[in-house]
Image (tube, coloured by chain):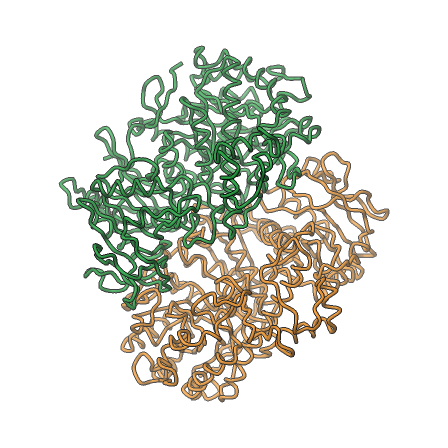
Chain colours: A green, B orange
């Protein structure tokens, strides 16, 4: 079979650019006699890959009795053979966790009913959920190892390296989810080595601090050894030291996820399986928890994310919305920046809930929105289901999932949405090497994307609040504007040819502060909105950027209104929440904005050689077009050229460019019809008027240009 | 003019049943020369009433300088005269708070900039927002009084009692909101008399406890007088005594809202204005905070609620959804049960945000959904706006609000939605005396509707969790079922002819427990789902209902699956979260449900004379149709007759009945089209097949039968 490869730009099937279009198809649920028909239906609709869990609880029903291929629902071999015959690639997900609405989240009952020591523990040392495991517990690893070995035995002949269909192996599933959703990180003392000289947690601390004195100084404690250090559970966010300890434990915990993932990979390599390997972050908000995992897994690793828009009535929205679209954008961008072709490893193919319903138009809009926002591949969860193996279902007997192909084999109405999308992606392989048009860098720090809720509330503008500003103020505002962003981490050198917009918290790493200074000093144009950072991310004083900005004395302001020192903004700009003003404008700065009484300067611009830095002491949630016009004005003052104009700002658009081709996406993610007039590259020689476009509710239109 | 009257069933205009259709129209914003044209447009579209704030900051620009009628934007007299000429009723809302996106929320700057003592204080004694007032502070009352007097002077000739158009006077605006949204109840020590012998708070405590010993016993404290008692701010929910103290302070605080409202009413009466009076709860979740206010205001008081579906991008949903519809139902039901004709005193007529947009189809669906869910009257916020008086706007210069009639006087696209709705309500005055068809009583306690977040987490199934179960499990489930609920408070005698379904927390008042026993003993059929209550709402032991249920020993269970001892539910019912099982089935009970291993009984039924009581130790969020069939089966076993069948359970329906007429509402509150087949009163002589109904996204169809 054609080998599947990928790099940061996209997927290749036998060297050819191709959208990675996978469907979850459980051999242990779908009746064997209907496998082939459903595989063909999938292929005909444009699919090229199948994925399946290989659930531990189904293959090791009693401890030590590991079964493959003995009965149809364990006949992974036959299923792999058939996939090969049908020319479909395969992703296997052997867990040990599957979730998949299986009993014990896919863990064998003999395991979770018998061995309490290997369960995850909360800070008090108690088991907090009956099937939540401590990943690296030695007993747990000992119990999983034989299953993994047997899995490898079965699968080895079908690996791509042996001419088989298996193009990827997933290590575990939505790592961390079972802990976080169920209320606690894992504090299993045996696993983590808490209180144990040379244990995992003491080793982490030693690596971070070097000496116990340094730790005690940072934590304001008097521990006499690293082994004596106890983590805090839920931080008291108003207490600096409690925040530091909680944050460090969280970083340590993320490292244990990486260690576990790398161990599973190592087992598979030992057992003669090759990569590539993959893992799915449970949701966009968790992507950055896998920075350590990406490092640990090395080359040939695909981190994807799961992009559901509703799973039950508890979700406030029932359909893809602009908020969802932005979450998808932010998720795809983080994946891209981690070196991945943005891949949605679980994309709704249905829902475990009958209500709210998954409707055809919503689903189609969901697929195209993900594509519009940068996706290069996806796996439908699920493409098709069937009856659960008796005694293994946690939520139903018939795992129908309201999926594209129902449990009984019939086509769901929603299948038409998939067929349409499959056809589009099959025709547009060129988009694998294309990228989203962007003319603004939106700066962020990785820590802010994964540490929300952990930050110290004694600061004026916390990382969490700043991340909200980025997502719901700047990102949303930019998508309503004539400009389009790409996300840009501040921990690496910055491209000086593109304006840099940065929402700034009171804390910013020294590296980021220095990179911004270098960017401006090298001729770049930076716009900072929010706080003027005064500490690093450990909340130690760090004011290099503030000094670069003239080291002004900051003052408190309450007005939500701003007056710009600019004729075209003669009137007041409202709905801007003040973060700080400055008592005096630095000598070499041009004042830019004032609070309405004009006593306090709320922003200024400094020219630095051929570069410049602008600071505005405000933040906002996107509400009004006036805010968006302010953004546009700031960007255009700093060298951004308009990219596209949508006369209706509430119709989102994106533009893919690559290989001489372009694809425009026009999205109406509202429940009512809308229309807009579009102009691309206005005011440039490439200016192109696309006329009026009308959109039904939940319609995403594409146009190849 | 025809007098407007109302009672619990609805509104009368000159004795005639008529929908109360009001529009917010600010004389201080709309240019005077366009008043008449906009009034006429409103009338032509079906409106019959205008409402306006009378903002203190506009009428008392300097302390002691109270101005009415001197300039067009203060010419309330001319505006009232014109309303009278045009035959429009008027609701006046003189604050003192207006909010209305006015500076200082409508408070004069001279007040909030000068007098810190009258500001609300947090538990630490600090001002927490620059315009958040302590309502009953003596200095504040002294400052408001002259404005209220001048207002009365201006308005008196226009009161209905004097043949004028003013049919209602609103006391303040969204009481409590400025405290709660801004992070704290008011703990102003001077206002509340904290630490003061005979002060408000000590008086409240003395009334509740009688003796300090009783208080100390309840709080586990050793105060030596009521005056010495300090409230706790944010409760530690895991600490029983902290919860009790926080809950008592909250109840006390609600009482101060009532006292303030009643004082404003008294002032108006003293100044020669008559009622009726009204007030708007800021949102459905706050309705029950006004129980004391309803008592204090006496007859001729209308409590309404504000029913926005989005105000900015921070709201997860952009359009009315089924969740919104249920919130509206619950709000209207609470108002009805408080003796009111359910009235939405602020219904979106636009939005302060340009994005997300308020679209015509969404808005039309919103109006009809509110009507479908029991509404008898509404006030559009806002019908039309205009420029702010210079220096008084907090969010804009031109208060356009994307309203039905724009600030510049032009018709918004959305005006068509209003015109359609105005026409429908004008034709269907009969619905004022009609009511929603219901065949199930859904029991609740008032305390649970207002005390969420205050409850003691040491209990197995908290009031908050139970309230979630009511809203998102039972209420939503019932609206997907063949049955329809009405809400029923458990503090009053219960109608024995209708089955009673009760989500039960671990705490339930003694009165409610006794009422349920009386209901069953008198021949009623009760179904309890959730905990078996073991304490009263003060968390004192109270097991009268548990004893009535055979006083079983409760046990913990973890499975989410249930097996019913019933042939038609031979298979497992999933997605039911266990609360408690019982170790042994009481002798005179028939077991009904078991956890899947059949070791522990999860529910049973007891016959009590001609009545019965069923208990199931589970709760759930609505997800699957299986859950809904379980509800249907339980209700039908207990005497409920199917009311209507919608073949598509995701299409919501309600039926109004009254005066020999019926109106059916069929709602598609999803972004994609849907269809359904409907049967009314199935299996009865009145059975009526309505055939297939197709619905566009956001379409609400009505059919008069």
Q: Quadrant of residue A524?
A: top left
* Residue B173 vs residue A140, the one in the foreground: A140
Name above or below for residue B661 compared with residue A95: below
Q: Residue B651 location in percent, x, y?
A: 52, 49
Q: Residue A228 location in percent, x, y?
A: 60, 37
* Residue furthest out toward the left: A685
* Residue furthest out toward the right: B587
* Residue A286 vs residue A22, the one in the foreground: A286
* Residue B591 vs residue A176, the one in the foreground: A176
Please tell me which residue is depicted at 23% across the width and 28% down the height of the picture: A659
Q: Residue B401 location in percent, x, y?
A: 35, 64
Name above or below for residue A338 compared with residue A459: above
Q: Is residue A381 left or right of residue B503?
A: left
Please tell me which residue is depicted at 52% across the width and 21% down the height of the picture: A35
Q: Residue A614 location in percent, x, y?
A: 26, 51
Q: Quadrant of the N terminus of chain B?
A: bottom left
Decide if residue A398 is in sight here.
no
Decide if residue B455 is in sight here.
yes
Q: Quadrant of residue B255?
A: bottom right
Name above or below for residue A127 compared with residue A19: below
Q: Is residue A79 left or right of residue B216?
A: left
Name above or below for residue B655 compared with residue B624: below
């Amino acid at each position: 079979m054609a080998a599947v490869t990928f790099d940061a730009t996209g997927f290749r099937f036998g060297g050819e650019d191709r959208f990675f279009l996978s469907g979850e198809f459980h051999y242990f649920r779908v009746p064997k006699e209907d496998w082939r028909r459903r595989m063909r239906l999938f292929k005909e609709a444009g699919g090229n890959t199948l994925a399946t869990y290989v659930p531990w609880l189904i293959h090791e029903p009693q401890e030590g009795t590991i079964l493959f291929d003995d009965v149809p629902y364990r006949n992974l071999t036959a299923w792999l053979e058939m996939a090969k015959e049908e020319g479909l690639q395969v992703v296997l997900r052997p867990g040990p966790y599957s979730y998949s609405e299986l009993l014990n989240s896919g863990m064998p009952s003999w395991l979770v009913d018998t061995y309490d020591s290997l369960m995850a523990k909360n800070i008090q040392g108690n088991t907090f959920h009956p099937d939540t495991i401590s990943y690296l517990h030695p007993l747990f690893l000992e119990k999983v190892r034989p299953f993994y070995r047997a899995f490898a035995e079965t699968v080895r002949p079908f690996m791509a390296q042996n001419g088989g269909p298996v193009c990827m192996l997933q290590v575990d599933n939505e790592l961390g989810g079972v802990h976080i959703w169920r209320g606690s990180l894992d504090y299993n003392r045996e696993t983590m080595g808490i209180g144990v000289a040379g244990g995992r947690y003491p080793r982490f601390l030693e690596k971070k601090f070097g000496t116990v004195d340094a730790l005690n100084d940072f934590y304001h404690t008097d521990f006499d050894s690293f082994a004596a250090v106890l983590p805090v559970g839920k931080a008291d966010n108003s207490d600096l030291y409690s925040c530091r300890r909680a944050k460090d434990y969280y970083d340590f915990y993320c490292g244990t996820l990486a260690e576990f993932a790398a161990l599973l990979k190592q087992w598979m390599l030992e057992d003669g399986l090759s990569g590539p390997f993959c893992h799915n972050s449970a949701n966009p908000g968790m992507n950055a928890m896998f920075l350590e995992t990406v490092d640990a897994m090395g080359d040939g690793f695909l981190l994807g994310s799961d992009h559901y828009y509703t799973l039950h009535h508890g979700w406030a929205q029932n359909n893809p919305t602009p908020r969802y679209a932005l979450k998808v954008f932010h998720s795809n961008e983080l994946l891209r920046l981690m070196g991945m072709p943005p891949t949605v490893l679980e994309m709704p193919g249905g829902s475990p809930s009958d209500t709210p319903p998954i409707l055809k138009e919503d689903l189609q809009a969901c697929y195209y929105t993900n594509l519009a926002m940068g996706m290069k591949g996806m796996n439908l969860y699920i493409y098709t289901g069937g009856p659960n193996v008796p005694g293994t279902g946690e939520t139903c007997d018939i795992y129908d999932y309201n999926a594209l192909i129902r449990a009984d084999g019939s086509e769901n109405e929603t299948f038409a949405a998939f067929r349409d999308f499959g056809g589009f992606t099959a025709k547009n392989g060129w988009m694998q090497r294309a990228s989203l048009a962007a003319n603004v860098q939106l700066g962020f720090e990785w820590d802010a994307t994964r540490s929300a809720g952990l930050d110290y509330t004694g600061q004026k503008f916390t990382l969490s609040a700043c991340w909200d500003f980025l997502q719901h103020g700047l990102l949303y505002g930019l998508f309503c504007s004539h400009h389009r962003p790409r996300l840009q981490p501040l921990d690496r050198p910055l491209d000086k040819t593109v304006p840099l917009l940065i929402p700034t918290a009171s804390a910013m790493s020294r590296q980021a502060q220095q990179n911004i200074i270098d960017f401006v000093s090298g001729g770049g144009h930076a716009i900072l909105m929010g706080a003027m950072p005064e500490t690093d991310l450990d909340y130690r004083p760090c004011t290099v950027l503030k000094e670069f900005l003239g080291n002004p004395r900051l003052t408190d302001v309450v007005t939500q209104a701003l007056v710009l020192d600019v004729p075209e903004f003669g009137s007041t700009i409202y709905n801007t929440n003040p973060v700080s003003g400055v008592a005096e404008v630095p000598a070499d700065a041009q004042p830019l904005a004032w609070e309405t009484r004009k006593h306090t300067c709320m922003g200024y611009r400094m020219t630095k050689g051929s570069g410049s830095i602008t600071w505005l002491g405000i933040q906002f949630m996107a509400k009004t077009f006036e805010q968006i016009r302010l953004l546009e004005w700031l960007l255009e003052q700093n060298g951004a050229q308009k990219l596209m104009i949508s006369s209706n700002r509430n119709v989102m658009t994106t533009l893919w460019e690559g290989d001489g081709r372009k694809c425009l996406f026009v999205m109406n993610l509202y429940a009512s019809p809308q229309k807009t007039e579009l102009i691309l590259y206005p005011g440039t020689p490439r200016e192109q008027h696309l006329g009026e476009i009308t959109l039904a509710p939940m319609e995403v239109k594409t146009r190849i240009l």
